[in-house]
Amino acid sequence: MKTKISLLLIALGILLSCQQSNPGTTKIKKGMIKVTIFYPNGDGKTFDMDYYSTKHMPMAASLFGDALKAMSIDKGIANAAPDEPLPYLAIGYFFFDTIDSFKNAIGPNSETLRADVPNYTNIKPVLQISEVQTVE
């Protein structure tokens, strides 16, 4: 039961972050591509949110240029069950119009982004690419 509640709260958080990713400048539309980067929690895992939000994500946005339509960050603060550890320390989101625009943006920049990861975490990120399905 605790796991189901946790998963529901994670899903709700993701949905809300998508809808609020860049208020007033970009409306997330159905069919956009969302690249989600999960940073799982675990023993000995560290994450520097200040570096991630002020250096890494702005660098990624700069490298992606106009292909990037929106981005947002979730900072994990609690699990739904008070006695269970946080599942993710952070989750980053990038939105693109198409999978091709994402591939073209990431291709020449993947090594630069990967090389920066040790500056903010010792976690191996987990990446998922999704098609956004907007609920209105």
Image (cartoon, helix red, strand yellow):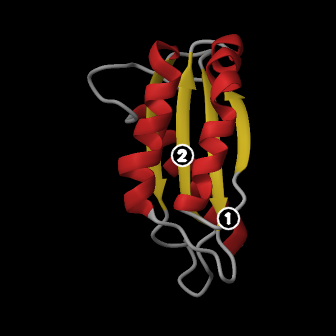
Rendered location of residue 123, percent (x, y): 67, 64
**Residue carrying label 2:** 92
**Residue carrying label 1:** 123
Q: Is residue 28 above or below residue 126?
A: above
Badge 2 marks a residue whose secondary structure is strand
Circles 2 and 1, Cβ within 8 Å, touching? The answer is no
| Residue plotted at (66% across, 45% down) | 114
Nearer to us in this view, 117 or 126: 117
Q: Is residue 75 above or below residue 79?
A: above
- Of the numbered discs 2 and 1, the one sitting upstream in the chain is 2
Nearer to us in this view, 105 or 132: 105
In the drawing, what numbered circle is on residue 78? Answer: none
Nearer to us in this view, 121 or 9: 121
Cα distance between the residues tagged 2 and 1:
13 Å
Q: Hey, what amino acid is under mark 1?
A: Ile
Rendered location of residue 1, percent (x, y): 71, 72
